[in-house]
Amino acid sequence: MVQSLNTKIDLAIKGTAFMGILNYGNIMIGDRAFEFYDLRDNRKYIQIPWQEIHYVMASVMLGGRWIPRYSIQTKSGAIFTFSSKDPKKVLRTIRLYIEGDKMVRSLGFWDRVKRRFGFKDNQ
């Protein structure tokens, strides 16, 4: 059995981890870490302490009304992608432990195309 890193849980919500295939489970956000536990297999879990998180990236669509997924990039360069029933609630809870400058919006489709072909914004 896996031991949780957290001593206090602020939010527990059902979620999905995108680790090659979809893994359904529970996301727990607490005082020490972001944790994901698979529902079917106890050996599949992700525990990311707050001090190891480099960025939290959110995929924002429809002007901020819909967030289909969010990713956590660690200081070692690993990227973990998740989705949940209420992503805004999850991101607000993460913001209690992560500074605002480490929470970023991921690039949209057209932003990636512009960057790929070297177009610059007129701003």
Image: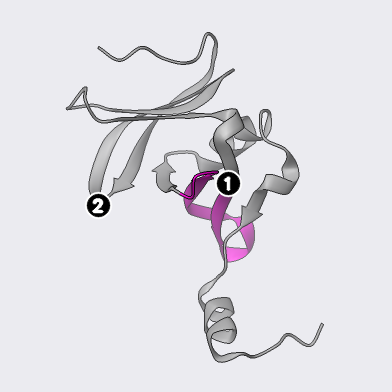
Say which amino acid is labelled 1.
Val
Residue 47: image location, x then y, percent? 42, 28
Q: Is residue 85 left or right of residue 64?
A: left
What residue is shown at x 70% (from left), y 88% (from top)? 120
Most prominent secondary structure in the magenta stretch?
strand
Badges 1 and 2: C-beta atoms under 8 Å apart?
Answer: no
Q: Which residue is mark 1?
A: 56
Residue 85: image location, x then y, percent? 42, 39
Q: Nearer the viewer, residue 77 or 22?
A: 77
Which of the two discs, 1 and 2, labels the residue nearer the N terminus? 2
User: Dot 1: what SS?
Assistant: strand
What residue is shown at x 57% (from left), y 68% (from top)? 107
Q: Which residue is mark 2?
A: 20
Say which amino acid is labelled 2.
Gly
Q: Is residue 31 above or below residue 113?
A: above
What residue is shown at x 55% (from left), y 10% (from top)? 8
Q: Is residue 44 above or below residue 86?
A: above
- Please say whether residue 70 is one of the residues in the magenta stretch: yes
What residue is shown at x 64% (from left), y 90% (from top)? 119
User: Dot 2: what SS?
Assistant: loop
Q: Which residues are magenta?
A: 56-77
